[in-house]
Each structure stands twice: as C-alpha cells, then as structure tokens.
Image: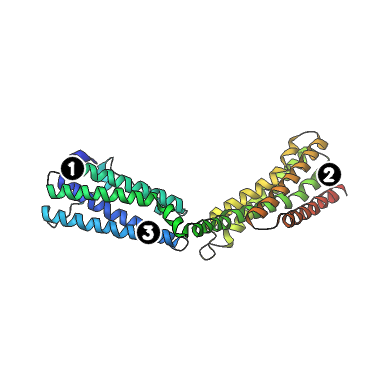
Amino acid sequence: MARSFDDLSEQEVLALAIRAEEDDSHIYGDFAERLKASYPDTAKMLLAMRDEELGHAHQLMESYKANFGEHLLLVRRQDVKGFITRKPLWLSKFLTVDQVRKEVETMEYEAQKFYEAAAARATNLPVRKLLNELAVVEATHEQIAAGFQDELKSSGHLSAEIETARRMFVLQFIQPGLAGLMDGSVSTLAPVFAAAFATGNSRDAFLVGMAASIGAGISMGFAEALSDDGKISGRGHPYIRGTVCGLMTTLGGIGHTLPYLIPNFHLATGVAVVIVAIELAIISWIRHRYMDTPLLAATFQVVVGGVLVFLTGILIGSA
C-alpha cells in the first residue's frame, strides 16, 4: 500500500529523493538519445541536465550515508501517495521536440516543489540545507527548460531544428497523406463516373464509388505500411504512415462519391464534378505548399491527370 508523504521519515524522504534523481537522470538520457540525430543541440542540453541530476543523487547519497548508513531503503515514486508522476513520454514511439521541452519544464518544477516540501519537514540541519539548495537548483533548471527555445534561437540553432521538424512532418505525414489523397481522388474518378453514366442511377454510382474508395484505401494503406520501416529513411513508423495514407485515399474517393446520395442523377453528377474540381485544387495547393512544387506546375500536373481519368470514366460509361 502507498503511504502518505507526510508519514515518511527523514531517512525515507532522502531515499525517495535519491531514487527520483536517478530516475530523472535516466529520463533525460532517454530524451537525449531519442533527439540526438535530429536535434543535437537540444540533446546536448538534456545530457548536461542528466549529469546534474546524477550529481544531485550523489550529494543526496553522501548525506544519506552520513546520517543513516550504507543501506539505501527501497522507496519508489509509486510507494508514496500523490508523489510526482512522470508521463511515459520516453516510451512513446512518436516524440516531438516540443513535447520533450514541455515535459522537462514540468519535471523541474515538480522537483523544486518536492524539495521545498521535504526541506520544510527536515529536522537535521545539514539535510535541510541540502534540500533547500536542491530546491533552488531545480528552480534554476526550470528556467533553463523554459528558455530552451530562447537559448537555441540566440545561438542560431533553433531555425535548423524548426526546419528539421518541418522536414520530418513532411516525410511522416504529408507525403503519405498526399499520395493517398491523389490516388483516392484521381484513381476512383473513372469507376465512379463510368458507373454513373453507364447506369444513369445515383445509387449504383454511390455503391461503386464507396467500394472503390474503401478498397483503394485498404490497398494503399497496406502498401505504404509495408514499403518502408522508416528506420533508415526517417519517414516515421510504418503503421502511422499506412493509416494516414489509407484514410486519405478513402477520403479522396468518398468526396466525389457522396453526392450520389442525391436521388436526382443529373444534380448529383453536377455536385460531384464541382467537388472533383475542389479536390484537385486542394491537391495542387498541398504539392505547392509542402513539396516545393511551383503552383502553376502543380496545378497543371494534377488537373491534366484528373481530367484525363475523369473523361476516361465518362467515355467508358457512355459506350
């Protein structure tokens, strides 16, 4: 059973502080390891903070030995009610640099409050002095964590990290999403409009469009997920990419399929054509915005391809 912090002895409080500092040092080390490839300057700061936490643990251990001997009690975070909990961000496969910066700031603030509370309960003067000193140090760390971005900005490293984050976002989300949206929007045009003009029936066109959209989404999702594990290319977790690609493929096809819920065939087709134009415009803008393709070239490539597929569907359906 967990115990209240107020019920802990001075020996138990020191043991808890030592374990907490050791845990936090490991967390900072894990953060640094995860970020060092893409954000080396932030990783260096985290490693420096890791080393300081280890230094704190050593100071606390020396105080513990001087007052209570060599045997360190096993007092852990989960043994104390309401004690500082750590979000398991370091276990997450998807960890952004902003998440790390915010978590570090929170960790240091919580550590400061812990040392202030522990110092207020300490009766041993050297122990109280040490705990108060650590509270001040943690407050300083909190300011450092809060100023991560300011320090990086002043050194000129922030712009490089922002560009890295943008590039990773494009690789992990925009590229698979765009591939799916293009495939869903363009490849389903032919079957949807072929079915529409072949039957002249909104319901038949809707069923064909839904089948084509969902089928294409499943196919594209699996193809993307199995194409690259992301370890070398840096494109992120394959299941996330596959999910993004599959959903966007389905969305691209469903967009011009839903109008065929309208019973009036001619009205439904008119609305579908307008939606196709909107879809192609969105794809062109995304290619221009994130893939650095000139807007005119992106529009020409997407529109020409879309129109050709669209006309193919109409011609086949009308034959």
Say which of marks 1 and 2 sits in front.
1
Indicate the secondary structure of the residue bearing disc 2.
helix
Identify which residue, 148 or 219, lies in the foreground: 148
Residue at the disc numbered 3 = 45
The location of residue 20, given as percent across then percent down, is: 27, 51
239 left or right, relative to 215: left
Q: How many numbered marks, from 0 up? A: 3
Disc 1 from disc 2: Cα separation: 79 Å
Residue at the disc numbered 1 = 8
The kind of residue tagged 3 is Met
Residue at the disc numbered 2 = 197
Identify which residue, 318 or 11, lies in the foreground: 11
The location of residue 9, given as percent across then percent down, is: 15, 44
102 left or right, relative to 240: left
Label 2 Cα crowd, 10 Å radius (few <14 / some 14-19 / many 20+): many
Disc 3 from disc 2: Cα separation: 64 Å
The kind of residue tagged 2 is Phe
Identify which residue, 268 or 121, lies in the foreground: 121
181 left or right, relative to 47: right
Image quarter of residue 293: bottom right
Indicate the secondary structure of the residue bearing disc 1.
loop
Identify which residue, 8 or 167, lies in the foreground: 167
Q: Is residue 34 visible?
A: no
Residue at 78 percent of width and 50 percent of height: 190
Label 3 Cα crowd, 10 Å radius (few <14 / some 14-19 / many 20+): some
Image quarter of residue 72: bottom left
